[in-house]
Amino acid sequence: MSKESNTNKSLSKAISLLRGFTPDEPEVRAVDISRKTGMALTTTHRILVTLTKDGILKQNPVTRKYSIGPILYAIGNLYSETSDVLQSAEEVIRTLNDMTREAITMAIHYRGNVVIVRAQEAKHALTLRSPVGTILPAHSCALGKALLSEMTDEEIDNLYPEDSLIRRTDKTTATKKELKLQLDKIRQTGVSFDSEGEYEGIEGIASVVRDSSGEAVATIGAAVPIYRMNPAKRELFANLIKLGSSLISYRLGYNVTVNTIRDIEELHSWWRENKLDSAT
């Protein structure tokens, strides 16, 4: 076997090993990685040691478990700085935050979870803080449900083999059957709602962002304490979030045929015409 083939094989094994770290298992033992990947334990240990030495991974000296290291975290931050989606969304997210004064976040889907990739905190003393890197179960929040609504029933069944879903609060969507009904409604309206499914006292509103091909690549949403919410504000924020996601999609090249706002100034004009006295 050539030196190049050996190198490619080793690289493939390292990538396979890194895929063993998931939101559900951010810290794993060598034997767990070996089991997940099917690699021999000696090979797994050798790769883990190399990646740890180079800062890609780190090892807890007490538990001996491995987790993502500082170098990989830094590389992930480079994605945030160079991603077309994030660059297109940055100004829109700041604008929505200024308008609503509520927390505005952007997230992507990863194996049944959503990962926060952009976050603007609310301009209130009491607020929810979900910093960049926060991982949430997709079925328990508006951000996640917006992205799940893009999946077929078969894909939902594969993602959630059992009907019962993990409860995060007393109000988390409890079954796959209930979730599917919610997803049907999101598909019809283009807006996702969730009240206290992830955090008690917090209501979420979200809508997907599409790239030039029409694929949903992210979602943006607002997180609002229930005591600051009312029916009129809920409708206002839902329309605003939907317009914001459409504007980001338009910037990514998506042929938006509804909510045809094309720039930030048009978004400002819409807000001035529609905002409520109690909205901010």
Image (cartoon, rainbow, N blue to C red):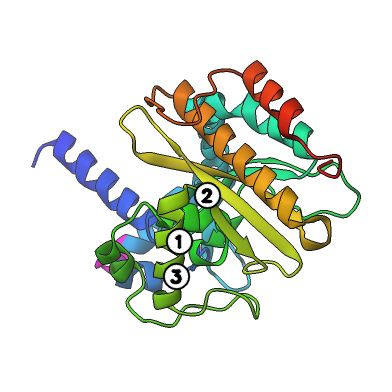
269 sits left or right of 162 in the view: right
The reply to whether dot 3 and dot 1 touch (C-beta < 8 Å) is no
238 inside magenta stretch: no
Q: Could one spot residue 93 in this view of the protein?
A: yes
Secondary structure of the residue carrying numbered label 1: loop
Res 120 quadrant in image: top right
Of the numbered discs 2 and 3, the one sitting upstream in the chain is 3
Q: Residue at x 75, y 52 (%)?
A: 129
Nearest the viewer among 240 and 107 is 240
Q: Position of residue 149 (x, y in %)?
A: 40, 55
Q: Residue at x 53, y 59 (%)?
A: 67
Relative height, residue 196 to residue 268 (above, below): below
Categorize mark 3 by other alpha carbons within 10 Å: few (<14), some (14-19), many (20+). many
Name the residue beneath numbered marker 1. Answer: 22
Name the residue beneath numbered marker 3. Answer: 179
Name the residue beneath numbered marker 2. Answer: 191
Number of numbered markers? 3
Q: Residue furthest left?
A: 1
179 sits left or right of 198 in the view: left
75 sits left or right of 232 in the view: left
In the image, the segment drawn in magenta is 37-43
Relative height, residue 69 to residue 175 (above, below): above
